[in-house]
Amino acid sequence: VSNFKIIESTLREGEQFANAFFDTEKKIEIAKALDDFGVDYIELTSPAASEQSRADCEAICKLGLKAKILTHIRCHMDDARIAVQTGVDGVDVVIGTSSYLMEHSHGKDMTYITNTAIEVINFVKSHNIEIRFSSEDSFRSNLVDLLSIYSTVDKIGVNRVGIADTVGCATPRQVYDLIRTLRGVVSCDIETHFHNDTGCAIANAYCALEAGATHIDTSVLGIGERNGITPLGGLMARMIVADREYVMSKYKLHKLKDIEELVAQAVEVNIPFNNYITGFCSFTHKAGVHAKAILNNPSTYEIINPADFGLSRYVHFASRLTGWNAIKSRAAQLNIEMTDEQYKECTAKIKALADIRPIAVDDADSIIRAFHRSMKLGKP
Ligand code: HCA
Ligand code: CU
């Protein structure tokens, strides 16, 4: 699973999110932030979508970012002709291959799709621009058809082929099997794109890498059509556990929270409370048993080190579940020192109040302070 590359699609798939409207300035701000974070590719909405989309695509190409700039088009010569004029480094071409899409969307058959694909690919390549060919709804497409068209486009020299779970139906095992099979058929890179309708988008991306995929599509906070795709932050969480050295060396992880806040604000959503890494409680430890172990050695209950992302852990101590080790640690933060017996007694007082009502940090702190004062005065 090492050496994977990210195709960041906040400015393409993400623009298909219900709330998304990015003006030129916002797109540039997001593109620069993603580039600074270290993503390999930034994918932009098709220049054929609208006049402003075309102008924005050209503007971002002119920024001179380290990341390669891609645009995403239908498998059609009209779109390809516009795309090659924008200054992009690469073009991601897509066409529906499932029976649903062939019958109810574009109405074309496999022979037509293959012939158009060949024409578009040769045209883009003749402009010295990178090209990826992908099927849409790959997991509901005919396997023999898929392998045959991928083998054809591989032979004429595409840089990547793409597999897309457009409807979010795939399971990790299905992903593994399909990518493994495809890996045996093509020699080019394999890009994958997973929607999250059934909550498998991160697991599917990971399985794809295990099976030999090379590129993963992401968006910030996972924004996209419906409930979106593999989130950039969630993929970072998964991958830092798999290969910390590679992830740490390649991405500026401490910028993740800022990028998420930038995008969350732009599309007017909150960062979910249980978000990977940046959710408000992602590194909060509450039960007394957990708190004690965490204070001893954070690895006991943490697979990800918050410091790797410029964040810190929090030991929750104002609750009925707390324990005296957490209270001792809190007392130290308040510059208060007592004996172990005293911490235990003080903890019992906090738990007694927390059994009656939810308590705030201030409540627990004043119990600690009052208890400590009474100890010094010699009356418990
Ligand atoms: C789309 C569909 C797409 C394409 C994915 C890809 C999907 O909105 O055009 O080209 O990799 O989910 O199939 O996003
Ligand atoms: Cu998609």
Image: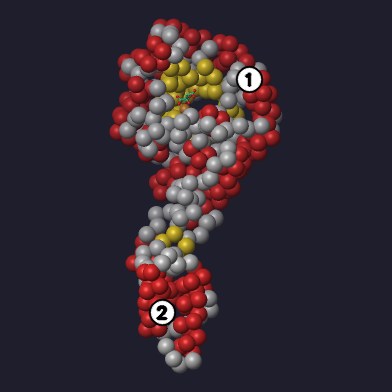
Among the 4 quarters of the image, the one containing residue 88: top right
Identified at 58% across, 38% down, the residue is: 267
- The C terminus lies in which quarter of the figure? bottom left
Where disc 1 sits, the SS reads loop
Q: Residue furthest bottom?
A: 378
Nearer to us: label 2 or label 1: 2
Among the 4 quarters of the image, the one containing residue 37: top right
Q: Please report whichever mark, 2 or 1, sits nearer to the chain's N-terminal start.
A: 1
In the displayed structure, 80 sits above or below 315; it is above
Identify the mark at residue 82; answer none if there is no mark: none
Q: Could you say which is closer to the camera, residue 334 or residue 120? A: 334
Among the 4 quarters of the image, the one containing residue 98: top left
Alpha-carbon distance for marks 2 and 1? 66 Å
Badge 1 crowding class, 10 Å Cα cut-off, few under 14, some 14 to 19, many 20 or more, is few
Identified at 38% across, 38% down, the residue is: 199
Q: Which residue is mark 2?
A: 346
Question: Residue 213: x and y, percent?
Answer: 41, 31
Amino acid type at circle 1 is Ser
Amino acid type at circle 2 is Cys
User: Is residue 340 in sight in this rendering?
Assistant: no
- The N terminus lies in which quarter of the figure? top left
Identify the mark at residue 50; answer none if there is no mark: 1
Q: Could you say which is closer to the camera, residue 105 or residue 233? A: 105
In the displayed structure, 63 sits above or below 118; it is below
Question: Residue 356: x and y, percent?
Answer: 38, 69
User: Is residue 88 in sight in this rendering?
Assistant: yes
Identified at 36% across, 14% down, the residue is: 99
Q: Could you say which is closer to the camera, residue 23 or residue 173? A: 23
Question: Residue 12: x and y, percent?
Answer: 55, 29
Identified at 44% across, 91% down, the residue is: 379
Mark 2 Cβ inside 8 Å of ligand 2? no
Question: Residue 297: x and y, percent?
Answer: 40, 66
